[in-house]
Amino acid sequence: FMVMSYIIAVNPSILNLGGGGLDVRQVATVTCLAAGLLTIAMGLYANRAIAIAPGLGLNAIVAFTLVGSMGLTFPQAMGVVVAEGLVITLLVLLGIREYVLDVVPLALKQAISVGIGFFILFIGLRNAGVAGVGGAGLPELLPLNTWPIFVAMAGLAITLVLVARGVRGGILWGILAATAIAFVVPGNVATFPDEPLAGPDFGLIGEFSFGFIGELGILTAILVVFSLLLADFFDTMGTLVGVGSRAGYLDDEGQFIDARKPLLVDSAAAAISGAMSASSSTSYIESVAGVEAGGRTGLVSVVTGLLFLLSLPFVAVVSAIPAAATAPALIVVGCLMVGVLGGRESGSGALGRPIAWDDFEEGVPVVLTMLVMPFTTNITNGIGAGFVSYVLLKVARGRAGTVHPAMYVIAAAFLVYFLRWALFDATF
C-alpha cells in the first residue's frame, strides 16, 4: 500500500490534464474505491499477492489522447475504457489472450511500454514547469524561476534519493515532502482545502457513455479501443511475469501458473474501473514490495485493498496536493518504465531480451513507437507508427512471410487511421 498509494494523488492530477475539469475529491474517491475493491477481488478469487489500481499510462491515454486530442467528453472516454475492459475480458474467457500476445513482436511490446514511460516522463516535466512548447512549436526548457518549479525540483531530488536508497514508499514520501515545501514557500503554490474532512464523493460512479462510437466513427473507435487494449495488455503481462518471478508463481519454463484467474480479475478490473470513472485499472509492479516483505498469498491483496478503502474518509486532503508535488512521481515512474529497454525487470515488468538496435527492421519501428507517443502526445499514434513501419520494412526486405497474418490486418487498419483525413476530409 505504501509504495503504490501515490496513485490516490496522481490519478486526479493526470485525468485533469486533458481539460476535463474534474472534481479532485470525486476522482480520488473512485481511485480509492476501485483500487480497494479490485485488489481485494484479486486476493479472494486468484489468491495472488498482486494489487490493482488505476494505471499510469492508461490514465494518460484518457487525458491526452481521448479527451485532449480527440475531443471526447470524460464520460465518453470512460466508455472507451469500459469497452476495452469488456473486450479483454472476453479474450481471457475464450482463452485467446495468450494468442494475441504471440502475434505482436517482442520488440514492439517493449517499445509500447517504453514509449508510455517517455510520455509519462514528459507529462511530469510539463507539470513541473520545466518543459513546455516554445515559439517554434517544439519542446524547450522553460525559465527555472518560479516557486512551483522550485517545489517540483526539490521534490524530485528528495524522491530520487529515497528511491535510490531503497526506502519503501519513496515516491509517496516524495509527494508528501514536496507538498510540505509547497505550503511553506511564497506564491500560494498549495492551499488548504475548504473542507478537509468532507469525506468521499461518489458522484462520478456510473458516469460513462458509449457515445464515443458516434463521435469518432466506427473505425477510429475500434482502433482507439485496440490501442488502449494493447497498452493494458502488455503492461499486465509484464507485471505478472515480474511479480511472479519473485513470488514463485512461475513454472520451470517461465509460464505463470494458473494465470487465468489473475488475468480474469485484471481484465474485468478495466471495465469495472471505467464504469466507476477511475480510468482503467491494472496490476501494479509495485506488488513486488509485498512479495519482498514475505507475502505470497491473496491475504496481502486483501489487506492492501482494505487500506485503500480506509483512505476514503481522507480524500478531500488530496485536493491540497499541487501538480508541482506530484510531478516528481511522474518523472521517476516514467524513468523506471523506460528501464525495460535493457530487457530486464522494470516498472513495466520483465519483457525479455534487449532490442536489436543494429537490425534496421526492428530498430526503426521501435524508435517510432517510443518517440511518436510523447512528440504527438498521443499513445495511439505511437503504436500505429510502430505497427505500420514494422510490416513495411519486413515486406521491403523480402521477409513478408515472417510477419504474422494478423499484423497485416492491424497495420492496414492503422494505415486507414492515419489517412482518415485524406480519405474523408481532404483539402487538396
Image (tube, helix red, strand yellow):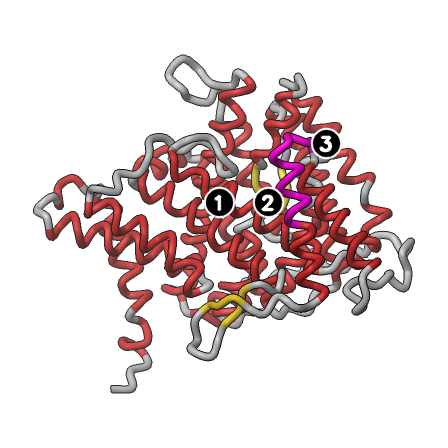
Q: Is residue 242 magenta?
A: no
**Residue drawn where x is 67% and y is 42% of the image:** 171
The image quadrant where one finds the C terminus is: bottom left
Q: Amino acid at mark 3?
A: Thr
Q: Kindly tell me whether residue 230 is visible in this rendering.
A: no
**Residue drawn where x is 36% and y is 54% of the image:** 383
Other residues around mark 2 within 10 Å, as few (<14) / some (14–19) / many (≥20): many
Tell me which numbered mark, 3 or 1, is placed earlier along the sequence.
1
Q: Where residue 20 is drawn, which disc sits there?
A: none
Q: Give the CA separation, mark 3 to mark 1.
A: 22 Å
Q: Where residue 232 is drawn, which disc sits there?
A: 1
Q: Which residue in the protein does label 2 denote?
A: 281
Other residues around mark 1 within 10 Å, as few (<14) / some (14–19) / many (≥20): many
Q: Answer above or below: position of 268 versus 369.
A: above
* Range covered by the magenta-colored residues: 156-168
Q: Answer above or below: position of 85 versus 340.
A: below
Q: Give the CA separation, mark 2 to mark 3.
A: 15 Å
Residue 350, position in %: x, y?
A: 44, 31
Q: Give the CA separation, mark 1 to mark 2.
A: 9 Å
Residue 286, position in %: x, y?
A: 60, 34
**Residue drawn where x is 53% and y is 51% of the image:** 58
Which type of secondary structure does the marked residue at label 2 adopt?
A: strand
Q: Where residue 304 is drawn, which disc sits there?
A: 3
Residue 348, position in %: x, y?
A: 49, 38
Is most of the magenta stretch helix, strand or loop? helix
Which type of secondary structure does the marked residue at label 3 adopt?
A: helix
